[in-house]
Amino acid sequence: MTRVKICGVTNLDDARQAVQAGADALGFIFVENTPRFVTPEQVRPIVRALPPFVTPVGVFWDHPVGHVKAVVEACRLRAIQLHGDEKPEDWQDAPVPVIKTIKLPPATTIEGLPEYKIGERIGALYWQKAAAAILFDSDARWSEGETREPIEWRAIRLMGAMRPGEGRLAIVLSGGLTPDNVARAVELVRPFAVDVNSGVEVRPGKKDPDKLRRFIAEAKRA
């Protein structure tokens, strides 16, 4: 069954709604000057209230390794998600599993950009020793509330067999997912997990309980 991460959580009520709907992981964005930025002081009590098998994930963007480790310890995070130009050699000794984000253009433009067909694979291979999973996301800017256009799904499915002798590369699919398209995305890609943010919101930083329930149900049923 595909796992579900609800990202951009900013408050305890949304965290509880997501957990009750069946979320496997919650994402907290520690990237300054973004719509869903949170501080360790805000996240620490939310993480303390989570059930034992729901994974709190910290999202970072080109932050120093020492800073990330301090936030992980302060909030008791159990995974790190990197969105910037980090170098894999700096993260091989990370205190918790690393999820590395690789950004792709929207599906409507990727056919005219064949270099991305190669680039996505090289990027994933580059991180295979340091990352526990690769997250494919849109290269669009952080959402201010609008739903982003989905990325190309079919090519990503091939990435799951790129780790000879080490099992399948864990793929997390993100970028433009909604309750209406996540089932189709799961059927095509067969990812380890899906990750959603603006697709289940009322506004930036505030989740919609009905969209949360529908999204998680559709992802797990697919």
Image: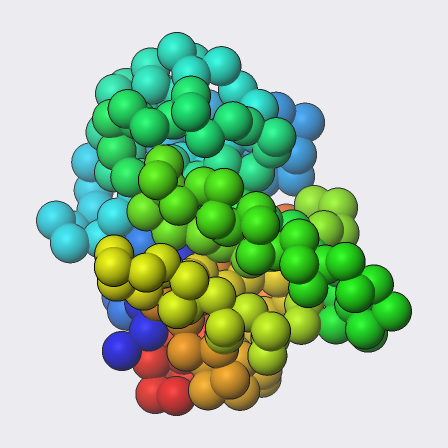
Residue at the outermost top position: 66
Image position, residue 112 (x, y; %): 87, 69
Image position, residue 144 (x, y; %): 73, 49
Instruction: Please give left or right for residue 22 compared with residue 108 in the image.
Output: left
Image position, residue 192 (x, y; %): 35, 67
**Residue 102 can be seen, yes or no:** yes
Check the image and report above or below for 170 versus 222: above
Nearer to me, 150 or 119:
119
Q: Residue at x 68, y 64 (%)?
A: 117
Quarter the N terminus occupies: bottom left
Q: How is the image coloured?
A: rainbow
Check the image and report above or below for 53 versus 106: above
Check the image and report above or below for 142 versus 66: below
Q: Residue at x 77, y 58 (%)?
A: 115
Quarter the C terminus occupies: bottom left
Among the 4 quarters of the image, the one containing residue 23: bottom left
Nearer to me, 17 or 129:
129
**Residue 144 can be seen, yes or no:** no
Residue at the outermost left position: 52
Among the 4 quarters of the image, the one containing residue 31: top right
Among the 4 quarters of the image, the one containing residue 203: bottom right
Q: Residue at x 55, y 69 (%)?
A: 156
Check the image and report above or below for 154 versus 119: below
Image position, residue 37 (x, y; %): 56, 32
Residue at the outermost right position: 112
Instruction: Please give left or right for residue 88 compared with residue 148 in the image.
Output: left
